[in-house]
Image (cartoon, coloured by chain):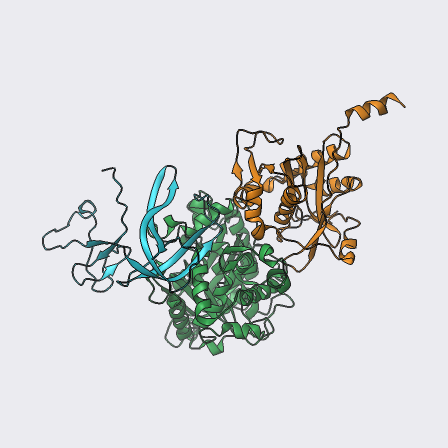
Chain colours: A green, B orange, C cyan
Amino acid sequence: MKKKQLLKEKTSNGVRKVGVVGIGHTKFGNLSDYELVDIMAYASLNAMEDAGIDGGIDQVIVGNMGAGMLNHQTGIESALVSTLNLEPAMAELVSNGPASGSSAFKMGYMAIVSGMVDVVLVTAGEQMRRVTGWEATDFVATLSHPEVEYPYGLTLPAFAAMFTRAYMAKYGLTERQLSLIAVKDHLNAEKNPFAHVQLPVTMEGIADSCHASVVNSYVSEPLRLYHMCPVSDGASSVVMCAMDGAARFKKKPVRIAGIGSATDTHCVHNRKDPLDLKAVRLAAEMAYKMAGIGPQDISFAELHDAFVILELCLAEEVGFFEKGKAIEAAEKGETEVSGRLPINPSGGLKAKGHPVGATGISQIHELVKQLRSEAEKGRQVKNPKYGLAINFGGFGNNVVATILAKE
Amino acid sequence: MNIAYELEMKLRPPQKEMLPYPAKFITMASGEKMVIRQAKREEIPLLLEVIEPLIKVEKDFYDIVAARFYAELLGFFRYRVRDEYCLVGTIDGVVTSICNGRLVNDDLGMSYHTMTIKRGLRCGAQMFAAKMEYHIEILNQKEVFIVAESPIGFRRWMIEYQLEPRFHVQHELGGVPTYVLTRDLYFAAKERLVTGTRPVPEELLKTSDTLILPEEYPQIPGWHR
Amino acid sequence: MYRVDKNVYAYKCPKCGQLHYPAPMRCKKCGYRRYPEQEIEPNFQREGYKPWEKTPLKGSCKLLTYTRLWNLPIGFDQRYLDFGLVEFENGIRASGRLLVDKPKIGMKLNVRVGKIKEFYGKVCYGLQFVKS
């Protein structure tokens, strides 16, 4: 009987099915008074509570980019297990820049699929406000090439700005159109209790008024302050399990339908086409293939909009829109919560915040929340079936795509 | 005339006639209009109430800025600081941010403090810009001495305006290294950092007539007036 | 030994001639290995191994995109810095400092090597793109 059940819970290619049964999240923002591990523990306990368990975790996987640098602390995976009193659960740290969270999630999935474990707690966190803005900018920039990029003072906003400039030249996108995306994201974040910036911004305020060029000044031309994510602290957590054992949890599982990931050149200049985000495309294709669906089946998406340009370009790379056309859909309101294909109903990195290592799990958290129809009033997507998350490491050099499905 | 009053008159510093800061408004990112105007002496007690809850907030050096700001405004109100002024920023009458400073002489301004209560809109950056505008453009001064007491302040003022380090001169706030805004530096930064519209439409200006205390402080979660 | 080599180099694969910047440990076209130091490879066989040829990055290039960065990381005290991404005539692409007044995508530039950073007394040299 048990064997029969197990077979039933496998996908057509014979792979064990995995689902998410618990989610937890801290508020994103300035949490610098707390210890990083405590923040992660808080999110973990919320996820366990949501799953209706108080232990029974086989493995803990932590996603984090920079505790060694920012907190001067290593071994946070062991520290987390210990503060949660989950010993002797296995514990590992997964690091993949700003895509650390999704990579940790992928590793959790692989661990369960392998049959080695049944229940995995994946917790991702980052604390960037313990240091000054200069140091935080420098910290993120350390993921660029140490000889031919970093020493010049190039930062992630600079790469994004150069990308935006080239995109504008090719497709005619304007700064004002970029602001439209920011306004939509802020509107969604205002309704998200976990969001860092719960402040609506208006087109008048950030683009149209005669004061806008000062109020919304350039950070890296042509990108302005409100075209970029804030620097945030925060953590998010999920409990994943094999679907064959999901019945013992409090809530119905949300199924992991597809995961894909791919890399691209470390140096941005070495890409054949500076506007080609190949790793995004390949990761999404892999996830679609695994899920047996295509972009037309996705009900909503959480895309890594650390810079608003990325919401547009990622939407194009994953096949939602033709190249250069995403802005038209945004202008028609198609990507709003009530639109045909809502994008970043959480507020996205842009307004929900971007504690780099935590972002991937935060995106998964949002997918689960939406697919369970538990999102707050005004930002719940209507009858979602499939949700897609794109977590973007480096400037597109290590990308993870995740598709979750309503069971 | 009683002796106490006579003594009080002796203690009070002489006050210079200062051109008033002409009110302006700025459309913030939220679309809200922030009115920036000069605070009247009789409004200082209310501004002290605005500041008071922040005196014990260590995060982002609010404690040191709030405690010193409180003392400076009290000194202004009780006639113990010479030629001081205070500017106030309001949205719908609610105080969002304040800044102050004083005139050392006709040519030299002394910037004191800038404090933001409402966060996320960069109100403080606009208040600091207004303060520099007051010294350089309205009062026509040659230089303003400035210090930073927090990393955020250092980034906003010293780096944004590329202020000239002049560590051998003494700022009135103590030993923190002194930086100087010259007229050239101000006008070089003006287009990028200083904005606002004058005159403020009557209806909008009216909203700022009676200052309203903030009900909540993002710096003190859970605190309500 | 204290003289600073101020050149910035592209590396040519000795087997297939493919140019790389920066130097990889394995040719992207033919897979030929690059041994940087004998010390880290005890089984290094010098016989038959051809070292990679260094070619200074110089000459004219085309500006592909650019930005003016106003928020600099720690270690830079300037108010802003301009950066460009260029393509050299030999196909090599690189990022570097842009030192032209009115940059325009597609404009011809020349490259030179100059100081890009000074941190705790250590000077770093790198690519600067100037008007051709």
The residue that appears at 19% across and 54% down in the rendered structure is C53
Evaluate whether residue A394 shows in this view.
Answer: yes
Measured as percent of width and height from the top left, residue A397 is found at 38, 61
Q: Is A338 situated above or below B41?
A: below
Q: Toward the viewer: A312 or B15?
A: B15
State which quarter of the image contains the C terminus of chain C.
bottom left
**B37 versus A180 height, above or below:** above
* Percent of width and height locating residue A140: 44, 51
Q: Is residue A336 left or right of residue B3?
A: left
**Residue situated furthest top in the rendering:** B3
| Left or right of A284 on screen, residue A302 | right
In the depicted view, which residue is nearer to us: C88 or A97?
Answer: C88
Q: How many marks?
A: 0
Residue B83, x across and y down, in percent: 72, 34
Which residue is most to the left?
C47
Q: For the N terminus of chain C, give its image quadrant.
A: top left
On the picture, is A333 further left or further right than A145? right
Q: Nearer the viewer, residue A365 or A205?
A: A205
Can you give x and y, in whole percent of width and height, for residue B148 in the image?
Answer: 57, 38
Any part of residue A96 in sight: no
